Image: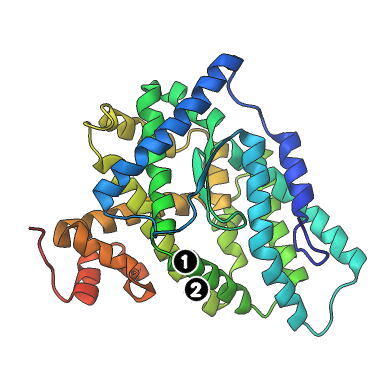
């Protein structure tokens, strides 16, 4: 999985996450099999609802994404592989630009240390993610993390079938975004490559900064306040050119997350009878509970993730209100139509820039 010059030993990260992760809620074998079957059914059912509401369709002739129901270790393994497939080639190119490259022993020691820390991070996140559409490393798969879905529906005290379909609506929206808009994944990958290209730091220095952030995570778990790392992974970013790229990435990810949020509520009670209850209780879940959880959210940048949901949802809802779904769907026509970061909170600016004038829905 990891190359010799890898910044992170992703094999070790995956093994570490497997060792640290908690299995999740107790279920019988029969209950687990029923959950897996219902999640597959809900994912298939969600496709038609998302297509009807959004107007998005997969590109004709494209590969049909695989739906995989996984446990927490399975999610951690998948993400370790995906991160390796995305980042290792970029770090290799970065290393080739340096005049002096570190020796094999120094690289191996550094990547193992970061691999251990990354494994702890994957273990933490693996208990919180409900679902994910994989963009990198697999050619596109829809992952549904069964123990987390079951744990959350039990904690919230909501109807399990409604909640499972509701989660699938969100993840299937991501699936249709990337299968219906062929340039979108390439755009995101290009932005990440530009982000790496904009740095003049060596891979070793980047690794040290990454280790600093991951050490902050460990300190928080042991009871530290983590205030010095309030930016989380943003602390790795120093170059103004990288900040500009990060603004573009934040804008596009806010768009896709906000669009999915809009859809999972927009289908209405005819599709998910308890949708309003789900939204109310799920919003409380996202606030985080204890002080350590709040610190970890800051350290890992999850507070920024919550802001993406809110800003993106505001943008999508605002544009649809001004221009209808057909007008909003102009966003998918090309990178030039993606929202600028300051348009997320001012959707009328996007409407004016892209559509020329605010057009009310018919």
Extreme residue in the left direction: 362
Instruction: Give the residue pinned by disc 2.
Output: 245
Q: In this rendering, would 264 be left or right of 206?
A: left
Secondary structure of the residue carrying tag 1 is helix
Given contact means CB atoms under 8 Å apart, are the residues at marks 2 and 1 in contact?
Answer: yes
Is 48 displayed left or right of 183 in the figure? left
Q: Position of residue 282 (x, y in %)?
A: 38, 34
Does dot 2 land on a helix, a strand or a loop? helix
Q: Nearer the viewer, residue 250 or 5?
A: 5
Q: Which mark is residue 326?
A: none
Give the image location of residue 174, x and y in percent: 42, 51
Q: Give residue 33's position: percent from left, percent from top.
A: 55, 21
Q: Residue at x 65, y 27 (%)?
A: 23
Q: Quadrant of the C terminus?
A: bottom left
Label 2 neighbour load within 10 Å: few <14, some 14-19, many 20+: some
Residue annotated with mark 1 = 249
Q: Quadrant of residue 251?
A: bottom left
Residue that appears at 85% across and 65% down: 107
- Residue 320 drawn above or below residue 130: below
In the rendered image, is residue 17 in sight? Answer: yes
Pointer 1 local density, CA inside 10 Å: few below 14, some 14–19, many at least 20: many
Distance CA(mark 2)–CA(mark 1): 6 Å
- Residue pictured at 36% horizontal, 21% vertical: 159
Residue 194 vertical placement versus 9 (above, below): below
Q: Quadrant of the N terminus?
A: bottom right
Residue 61, horizontal then vertical, whole percent? 44, 59
- Left or right: residue 318 versus residue 148 is left
């Amino acid at each position: 999985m990891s190359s010799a010059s890898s910044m992170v030993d992703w094999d070790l990260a995956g093994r570490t996450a497997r060792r640290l992760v908690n299995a999740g809620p107790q279920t019988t074998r029969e209950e687990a099999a029923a959950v897996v079957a219902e999640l597959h059914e809900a994912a298939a059912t969600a496709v038609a609802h998302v297509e009807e509401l959004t107007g998005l369709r997969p590109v004709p002739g494209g590969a049909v994404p695989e739906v995989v129901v996984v446990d927490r270790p399975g999610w951690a393994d998948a993400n370790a592989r995906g991160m390796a497939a995305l980042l290792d080639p970029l770090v290799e190119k970065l290393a080739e630009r340096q005049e002096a490259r570190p020796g094999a022993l120094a690289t191996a020691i550094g990547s193992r240390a970061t691999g251990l820390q990354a494994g702890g991070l994957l273990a933490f996140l693996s208990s919180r993610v409900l679902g994910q559409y994989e963009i990198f490393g697999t050619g596109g798969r829809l992952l549904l993390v069964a123990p987390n879905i079951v744990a959350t529906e039990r904690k919230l005290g909501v109807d399990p079938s409604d909640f499972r379909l509701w989660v699938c609506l969100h993840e299937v929206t991501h699936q249709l975004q990337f299968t219906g808009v062929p340039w979108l994944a390439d755009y995101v990958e290009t932005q990440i490559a530009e982000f790496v290209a904009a740095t003049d730091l060596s891979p070793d220095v980047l690794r040290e900064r990454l280790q600093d952030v991951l050490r902050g995570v460990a300190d928080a778990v042991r009871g530290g306040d983590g205030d010095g790392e309030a930016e989380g992974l943003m602390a790795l970013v120093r170059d103004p050119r990288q900040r500009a790229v990060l603004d573009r990435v934040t804008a596009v990810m806010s768009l896709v997350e906000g669009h999915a949020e809009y859809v999972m509520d927009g289908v209405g009670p005819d599709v998910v009878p308890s949708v309003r209850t789900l939204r109310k209780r799920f919003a409380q879940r996202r606030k985080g509970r204890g002080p350590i959880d709040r610190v970890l959210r800051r350290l890992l940048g999850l507070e920024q993730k919550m802001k993406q949901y809110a800003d993106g949802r505001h943008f999508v809802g605002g544009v649809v209100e001004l221009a209808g779904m057909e007008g909003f769907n102009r966003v998918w026509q090309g990178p030039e139509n993606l929202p600028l970061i300051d348009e997320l909170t001012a959707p009328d600016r996007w409407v004016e820039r892209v559509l020329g004038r605010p057009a009310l829905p018919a």
